[in-house]
Image (cartoon, rainbow, N blue to C red):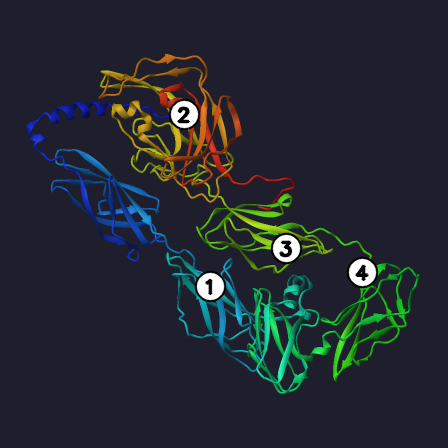
Amino acid sequence: MFHNIVIYNRVLQMVILSVLLFSCDKVSNLSDSNQIEEVIIEDVLPAHVILDKPALTEGLITIPVKLGKYYFPIKVKLDFKTSHNGIKILGIDNDGYIEFQEYSSVKSVYVVSESGLTKSYDIKLDVLPSNEISEIISFYTGEIAGPVGTEISEEGYPNPTNSTVTLFLTSSQFPLTIKPLIKISKGAKITGWSTGESITFMLPEETKKLKLISESGREEEWRIIIKNAVPDYKANKEELLTVYEKLNSPFISLNAQSLNENFQIDSVHKSSATNEITIFYNDIKRSFPADVKIDFQLKNQLSLLGTPPSKIFKFPTDTSTFSFNIIDIINGIYTDWRICLKPKSYKNILNSFAWNNYTSSDNLVTLEGAYIDNSNKIISIPVISNGSFPLTINGITVSSANNISSSIPSTITFASIEDFKVYSIEYLGLSEFWRIELVNNFSPKSNKADIIDFELGNTSYGYNISEAYIEPENSEIVILADKFIPNEPLKLSAKIKISENAIIEDFTVGGVLSLYSGTPVKLNVIAQNGDVKEWQIRLVIAPQIPNSDMEIWRVHPQYTTINTIFPSDGSGWNSSNNPSLTGVFKTEGFNSQYAAKVTTTLSSINFADIIKVTSLASGNLFLGRFRYSTLASDVYNPSSMTLFGIPFLFEEIPLQMNFMYKYHRGEKLQRTTPKISSTIIPAFNPVEDLPGTDRGRAFIELWNDNRSQLNASGEILLDQNKNEWTLGQINITNYNYLKKPNYIAVGFTASKDGELFTGADGSFIIVDEIKLIYHKQGKGSIKIK
């Protein structure tokens, strides 16, 4: 599975020289001490990077980065305090700095003792956790100064998917000055504006800019936009449909309290048909003027338009009313609401609505008895079979327990099923308008309540949506994100298309959805016939292996003469490529520039024309760290030089690993076994031919607790030549459901028994487009990304 390390001629010479040197008295008197005892930061570039005190462990120096994630490359000058004065430090640039191109870079220095003993230390940066988010969470207009009659939404709508705050107003007169109250992300700050400062708009549709800087140092520009509000009767019909239900039923809670002993409140009613808040009072205990305290809470994305009404309303008489506007702060549509008083006896003013007969053009129209909605002042007449209009109803009578006066005539003619009539009813000096309408109960009503399309729109910072599906079988939208910010939601401005004549409860097109992994957002889709289907939108955190497309190849971080897969420093892909032998190469990819070619070779090297070493070396592409060594004990045991796995954050365990590959097996299966008797210089017995054929291997393992416990795994053996690109699939089997893994190990080799120096010369596997699969499509699934 690994390259057997073939030793250079000069390595042999160094071994012999070392034996001679250690026999000299002069060398034996020199110190072997090669320890770093303390590391001090002398300087860092750029200057605004903030580092913490380096931590020193065995063979590793970790430098914490408090601020600097967005300022790479970073150069650090270090002062090494060592255990002996005669120690030399190698591996530092001529200017005295160590440069980190990115936060995952790992650098090495070599500590050489007086006697020549060398010890290596890896140096890495540890970017400390800090808040990446620089968002405006809420924006209230606060104090307002502008032309008389100007009404502006009390609250702006922050949209983190496009970094905007939108304010709506009813007047086009300027200038308009606000002193906003702005809440931003934890640890973030606004540059160029301070709390208590004003913002002035001079023109319609003007935009003001604010720069936010997150706790981690990331900059983001936000735009404050001012737009004209639109009354509901002038709104685009399609947009109005998305907010109609919410604007006409806007309250989460509403309470009224009398502040006068001689004015007693019976109940409070909200009418979505007339947009009225009606306070019913006791017919006897009703002294005026009356002071009423009203508290209400609006639904999300709704705000008051204009100066908020006082919580205390003073009614001089029982006919006094108050009006205010409620606006949807996403699209700027608003509607007018009215507060009025009525005696308790008005609650059920009508008892019945009846008629003697009715006729239509073809006498095919059939009616059922009317039903009365006293709360919304609507009389509905069901039509149970259709025919030709007009329809005339004769001998109409209305009854009431009270002494009312009605303008409803005895005969009413309707021109069509959509026609309606409005009449007045007067009682105790108060006149109200009532609506008489026909209800279509003959046409079949659809029971469809499906989501048929889902536009993802923009997403918030730090997220990338890799795939998304509509799954009708489970009534869910599944969104997979391969880039994400832990513990922060995905925010997206989605547009949802649903079944014809259906509606989504409490959802506005263009509004921002916030999705957390493991906590689906639930939506009720209501069919035309009233059936309700619950849908959910589920976020799946689906990270992929860095450089899984095999496109990034760099100079080896330790051996500058070797080109290898990136990063090869222990934080991602690695290979057993080393100064002795290369077994992983870049080659033409699957519909891309590069793929990785992993080879098995039988090679021989002569050392000073004295020793000839022949060994079978199987290349290996894997996630983890490779420690190059020429010691015989390491060469004989390749696994001692490899640490499989890299840290990986899993919210969900993948179901499968897919990859594209080509495979070719060599002609003859062979084995070279180590000469265990040769303990200084690696040596191997003569090549041995074996029965059978070579096979390649691909595997995945998920671990937790620092690689101590296997959570899940899967593998596939490749025993057939594949000259064309072929899809490889490895099903992942879970062993431990109780703990999430935090390490991932993936490997590819052309010879599955390469670790035992067994394989076929010329075997190779070419690998590209490695992908972890977190979701499998169900029946009728629709891929939307």
> CA gap, disc 1 to disc 4?
47 Å
Q: Is residue 373 above or below residue 150?
A: above
Residue that extends furthest to the right in the rendered view of this protein: 362
Disc nearer the start of the sequence (1/4): 1
The disc placed on residue 524 is 3
At label 1, which amino acid type do we have?
Ile
Looking at the rendered image, the disc whose residue lies closer to the viewer, 2 or 1, is 1
* Residue holding disc 2: 599
Does residue 714 appear in this view?
yes
Q: Residues within 10 Å of mark 2 (few under 14, many from 20)?
A: many
Mark toward the start of the polypeptide (3 vs 4): 4
Residue 419 horizontal/vertical position (percent): 81, 67
The quadrant of the image that shows the N terminus is top left
Kindly state the secondary structure of the residue where label 4 is placed.
strand
Q: Nearer the viewer, residue 376 or 285?
A: 285
Tell me whether circle 1 and circle 4 mark residues in contact (CB < 8 Å): no
Give the residue displayed 79% in from the left and 80% down from the top. 404
Amino acid under label 4?
Answer: Asn
Q: Is residue 73 above or below residue 429?
A: above
Residue at label 4?
Answer: 440
Q: Nearer the viewer, mark 2 or mark 3?
A: 3
Viewer-proximal residue among 741 and 5 = 741
Which residue is tagged 1?
A: 136
Measured in 3D between alpha carbons, the distance from the residue under mark 2 to the one under mark 1, in whole angstroms, is: 53 Å
Cα–Cα span, label 4 and label 2: 75 Å
Residue 638's place in the image compared with 108, above or below, is above
**What is the three-letter code of the residue carrying label 3?**
Asn
Task: Tell me the SS state at disc 2.
Answer: strand
Name the residue type under label 2: Thr
Residue in the image at 34% along x and 30% along y: 577
Report whether 366 appears left or right of 264: right
